[in-house]
Image: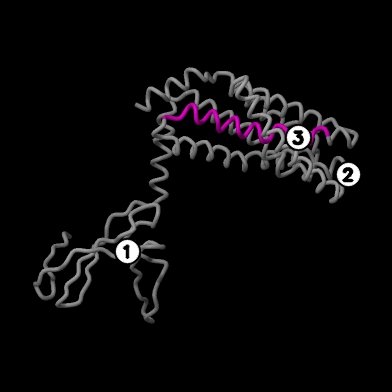
């Protein structure tokens, strides 16, 4: 029904305005038979603040002191997110280097997530680490990661993003192999510090390549897609490790060796990526 400026009660003219939604979306909720408010059946009158419109259009009659608020057709944020995702997926054919990079990032982040979330479990179950040993390992690995990330920036500028990421993935492959076949504590300490060196550098290299492949007008969209791939990997990676240990009867060495497969596959996914072609496509489609 079309809402006019004429008051349906007195026939006078109504003033146009709006109801501001500063913090939450404005909703109308019905009352039940007992007179209580039923919050589970709201009718949305405005979008979500920050994300959408923060006003609900309304008309006010000074004579009747009545406010009339039409119910707009509001698309849910989930529906909008789905359309944004469809748009990005639909454009991956034009950005095939970014597509391959996203596959690469998903695969190596699966492995990284296993190392981050389950290294303490592996250290305790296989290497016999106690709590104080694990805490010391985490502390030292974070120092190694900081040093590695800082130094890697200079290496990346010198040899290029793709070659630098490939080198980092090779370090990850070596790290997993050392951890899987370690029989002495010092060997596992070597693996842990290799993980620290590779952890910060792999993250920075991937994000730097996204910046090269993303059109200037769609940077946020491409970074969001990249982050979504990494968040999905943070679920898939640890689940795969858990599945392998369950299938093999708590064979943690077998599970960590399987994790190495993620890094090998990510290295293969990186092979078709062309920095020059990807940058040229991004520049052309930015215009």
What residue is disc 1 on? 20
- Is 50 located above or below residue 91 in the figure? below
Residue contact at pointers 2 and 1, CB within 8 angstroms: no
Callout 1 environment at 10 Å: few (<14), some (14 to 19), or many (20+)? some
Give the residues drawn in magenta, as a range.
190-215
Q: Position of residue 129 (x, y in %)?
A: 86, 45
Q: Position of residue 43 (x, y in %)?
A: 33, 63
Q: Secondary structure at mark 2?
A: loop
Q: Which mark is residue 256?
A: 3
Q: Nearer the viewer, residue 158 or 113?
A: 158
What residue is disc 2 on? 128
Main SS of the magenta part reads helix
Q: Nearer the viewer, residue 144 or 232?
A: 144
Q: Earlier in the sequence, mark 3 or mark 1?
A: 1
Q: Secondary structure at mark 3?
A: helix
Indicate the quadrant containing the N terminus: top left, top right, bottom left or bottom right: bottom left
Taking the magenta stretch, the answer to whether it contains residue 113 is no
Q: Earlier in the sequence, mark 3 or mark 2?
A: 2
Q: What is the C-alpha distance between the residues marked 3 and 1?
A: 54 Å
Q: Secondary structure at mark 1?
A: strand
Residue contact at pointers 3 and 2, CB within 8 angstroms: no
């Amino acid at each position: 029904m079309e809402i006019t400026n004429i008051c349906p009660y007195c026939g006078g003219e109504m003033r146009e305005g709006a109801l501001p939604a500063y913090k939450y979306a404005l909703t109308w909720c019905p009352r039940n038979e007992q007179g209580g408010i039923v919050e589970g059946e709201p009718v949305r009158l405005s979008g979500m603040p920050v994300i959408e419109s923060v006003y609900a259009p309304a008309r006010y009659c000074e004579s009747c002191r009545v406010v009339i608020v039409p119910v707009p057709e509001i698309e849910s944020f989930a529906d909008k997110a789905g359309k944004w995702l469809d748009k990005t997926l639909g454009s991956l054919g034009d950005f095939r280097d970014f597509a391959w990079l996203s596959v690469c990032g998903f695969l190596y982040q699966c492995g990284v997530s296993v190392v981050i979330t389950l290294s303490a479990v592996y250290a305790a179950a296989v290497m016999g680490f106690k709590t104080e040993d694990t805490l010391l390992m985490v502390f030292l690995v974070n120092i190694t990661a900081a040093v590695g990330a800082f130094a890697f920036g200079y290496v990346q500028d010198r040899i290029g993003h793709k070659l630098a990421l490939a080198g980092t993935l090779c370090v990850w492959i070596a790290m997993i192999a050392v951890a899987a076949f370690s029989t002495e504590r010092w060997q596992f300490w070597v693996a842990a510090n290799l993980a620290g060196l590779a952890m910060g550098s792999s993250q920075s290299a991937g994000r730097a390549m996204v910046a090269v492949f993303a059109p200037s007008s769609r940077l946020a969209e491409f970074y969001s897609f990249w982050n979504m791939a990494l968040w999905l990997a943070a679920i898939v990676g640890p689940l795969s490790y858990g599945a392998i240990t369950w299938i093999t009867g708590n064979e943690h060495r077998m599970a960590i060796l399987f994790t190495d497969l993620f890094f090998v596959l990510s290295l293969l996914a990186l092979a078709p990526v062309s920095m020059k072609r990807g940058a040229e496509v991004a520049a052309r489609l930015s215009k």
